[in-house]
Amino acid sequence: MTDAAHLRRRTEELLAAHPPATTDRLDFLRARFDAGLAWVHFPQGLGGLGVPRSLQAVVDAELAAAGAPDNDPRRIGIGLGMAAPTILQYGTEEQKSRLLRPLWTGEEVWCQLFSEPGAGSDLAALGTRAVRDGEDWIVNGQKVWTSSAHLARWAILIARTDPDLPKHKGITYFLCDMTDPGVEVRPLRQITGEAEFNEVFLTDVRIPDAMRLGEVGDGWRVAQTTLNNERVAIGGTAVPREGGMIGKIAATWRERPDLRTHDLHQRLLGLWVEAEVARLTGVRLRQQLAAGQPGPEGAGMKLNFARLNQEISGLEVELLGEQGLLYDDWTMRRPELVDFTGRDAGYRYLRSKGNSIEGGTSEVLLNIVAERVLGLPAEPRTDKDVAWKDLAR
């Protein structure tokens, strides 16, 4: 049986064989994966040891104390939080063996080709088509709001393979090589001045059937695994007390007594308590996750994450007064990650507006919480059994 003591020994052996101070960063990450210490709850041979997810903290603590490099999880969050668990659950042995190691080490960045100009909140209405041609699928369509597409080697993609079926049933899930001919990535400049998002055009892109994930026509069920993990990844990230955006405004409050008012103090106290409740709820959610696959509860965490970020950043700008209206740089650039705490208050205020849209709009997530968590009656859906090709568009 593998316990905490055994994991510490394995970690010590890794550090002895590959001292962080003298080992190339990528070589160390590869060795860590091969030792089963990347994500310990994954199966042996795929970066894990098949032990409870909770034991990952033992490994992480030992490696952090030794100054070992991490895999820059913020940069590869889509791969780690969305693609990897979906590939693990539905992928073939060949897919898992080929894709998971460079995904975890960060050698290959992933993006998510789900949303479309006419299928965002109603994702199942997507119109990107995949038509079978021998051992390949020919894909045509447009995707939008694609984070990291300008960096990505791979994409998780859902496309319509049978327009004669109702919209939820005629979808298939693919793994798309972003370097293939016909894949065009264009930047979408945001309110922050940056273009971390993109739109992606797919023109006669050939995807081998070997890169299909799950059965033909079962893409919506496979996609639910991705979406549930996405909401947990966004809303349930582990942070220390006063971590994230609440820590920035709390630090300003302590350092700038000249800015304080009684009203601002009361509002800050309320948001501090809410942030701490959200942090502890995230701990509980991750404990539940360790016992199985994430469910719709992640929708509630993501909802709260978006609201809190927007309220905290708004209060921070108000606290800073005229200084809060300043913005550091409007230069058009295509960043590798979203850095909420490394930028100024103006950036946090503007960027947090997207939190209630990305990863599922707050309106859609409210429906999910109502129907799947609280058990309330579902809204009437007149298009549920209508063939996709007959839907009004």
Image (cartoon, rainbow, N blue to C red):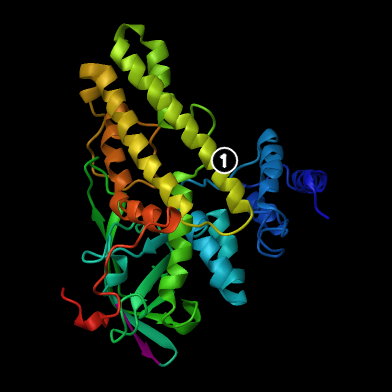
Q: Residue furthest left?
A: 393
* Whether residue 34 is situated above or below residue 96 in the rendered picture: above
* Residue designated by label 1: 283
Picture coordinates of residue 52, whole percent (x, y): 70, 53
Left or right of 311? Residue 69 is right
Q: Is residue 30 magenta?
A: no
Left or right: where 255 falls relative to 118? right
Instruction: Please indicate, yes or no, whether residue 82 appears anywhere in the rendered image.
Output: yes
For badge 1, the amino acid type reads Val
Question: Who is closer to the viewer here, 62 or 53?
Answer: 53
Q: Residue lying at the far bottom in this picture: please name it.
A: 134
Q: Measured from the top left, where is residue 249 in percent x and y?
A: 38, 22
What kind of element bears circle 1? helix
Percent coordinates x, y for residue 32 in the rendering: 68, 52
Residue occupying the far top of the picture:
258
Q: Which residues are magenta?
A: 129-133
The quadrant of the picture occupied by the N terminus is bottom right
Vertical position of residue 338 compared to residue 205: above or below: above
| Residue 92 on image: x %, y % | 58, 76
